[in-house]
């Protein structure tokens, strides 16, 4: 069993220096990773229940943690549809290079409708956008002459550097529930699954068993899938 130090809720630390101290301590104790989470803007009201006020930018905080540690992994949950794919892919590859190949992307679809509205992103299309962006990121990270054509992103005749330090690219974990959408996304695009909420219960055990069976039916090695 491996353990991760989840920095959220960020307001409890009293500042970035305390987070860095906690990250170094977790590394010294043998923790597997430091977990960083993502929101951009937090609306007021009951629909945002559980969303705290303090949310440092995911890329800056991930970089800060990387610069304050040497071996521990940086596991960042990113709401993929929130931002354009080209700068997001560039930030991820740069952090992976800077950290010496210690970055893991936990790709989330998102759930907070008003945040999508404020960011000008279609809430209804968030799953489709996530799938397309992840596919485009893989092209950007692995191909010398990246080209992609989709509904939400198109590029060709570009140079994209740096590539990820890890080969073929940073690990992609799918963050979400055990519904058909997240599981299909995991089997098609991910190397690991990070269920959101809940604990070690029968439903989680049944989901893991089901995922492994579906992976085997697709010709994937079930034991190669990471479950957090």
Image (cartoon, rainbow, N blue to C red):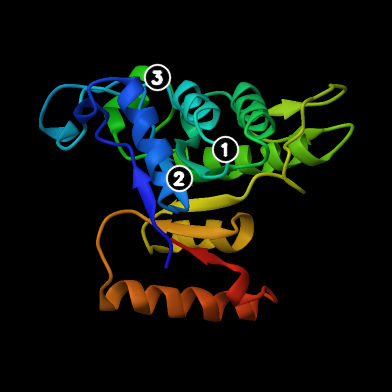
Q: Which of marks 3 and 2 is nearer the N terminus?
A: 2
Q: In this view, does 20 lie to the left or right of 140?
A: left
Query: At numbered mark 2, what does the secondary structure look like: helix, strand or loop?
Result: helix
Q: Mark 3–mark 2 contact, CB under 8 Å?
A: no
Cα distance in 3D space between marks 2 and 1: 8 Å
x and y percentages locating residue 205 in the rendered image: 35, 77
Return the residue at label 2. Answer: 27
x and y percentages locating residue 184 in the rendered image: 53, 62
* Residue in front for this viewpoint, 9 or 108: 9
Q: Which of marks 1 and 3 is nearer the N terminus?
A: 1
Mark whose residue sits in front, 3 or 2 = 2
Return the residue at label 3. Answer: 119
* Residue in front for this viewpoint, 62 or 133: 62
Cα distance in 3D space between marks 1 and 3: 34 Å
Residue 11 visible (yes or no): yes
> Callout 2: few (<14), some (14-19), or many (20+) C-alpha neighbours within 10 Å?
many
Residue 36 visible (yes or no): no
Q: Is residue 120 left or right of residue 71?
A: left
Name the residue located 42 percent from the left edge and 19 percent from the top edge.
120
Name the residue located 10 percent from the left edge and 32 percent from the top edge.
46
Query: At numbered mark 1, what does the secondary structure look like: helix, strand or loop?
Result: loop
Mark whose residue sits in front, 1 or 3 = 1
Return the residue at label 1. Answer: 70
């Amino acid at each position: 069993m491996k353990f991760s130090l989840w920095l959220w809720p960020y307001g409890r630390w009293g500042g970035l220096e305390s987070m860095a101290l906690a990250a170094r301590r977790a590394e010294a104790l043998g923790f597997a990773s430091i977990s960083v989470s993502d929101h951009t803007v937090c609306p007021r009201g009951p629909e945002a229940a559980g969303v705290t006020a303090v949310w440092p930018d995911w890329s800056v905080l991930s970089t800060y943690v990387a610069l304050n540690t040497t071996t521990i992994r940086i596991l960042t949950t990113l709401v993929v549809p929130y931002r354009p794919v080209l700068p997001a892919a560039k930030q991820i590859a740069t952090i992976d290079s800077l950290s010496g190949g210690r970055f893991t992307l936990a790709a989330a679809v998102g759930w907070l409708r008003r945040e999508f509205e404020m960011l000008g992103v279609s809430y209804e299309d968030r799953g489709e956008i996530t799938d397309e962006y992840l596919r485009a990121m893989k092209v950007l990270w692995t191909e010398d002459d990246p080209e992609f054509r989709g509904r939400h992103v198109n590029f060709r005749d570009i140079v994209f550097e740096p590539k990820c330090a890890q080969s073929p690219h940073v690990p992609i974990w799918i963050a979400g529930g055990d519904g058909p959408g997240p599981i299909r996304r995991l089997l098609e695009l991910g190397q690991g699954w990070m269920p959101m909420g809940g604990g070690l219960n029968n439903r989680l055990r049944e989901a893991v068993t089901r995922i492994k069976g579906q992976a085997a039916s697709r010709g994937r090695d079930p034991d190669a899938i990471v479950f957090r």
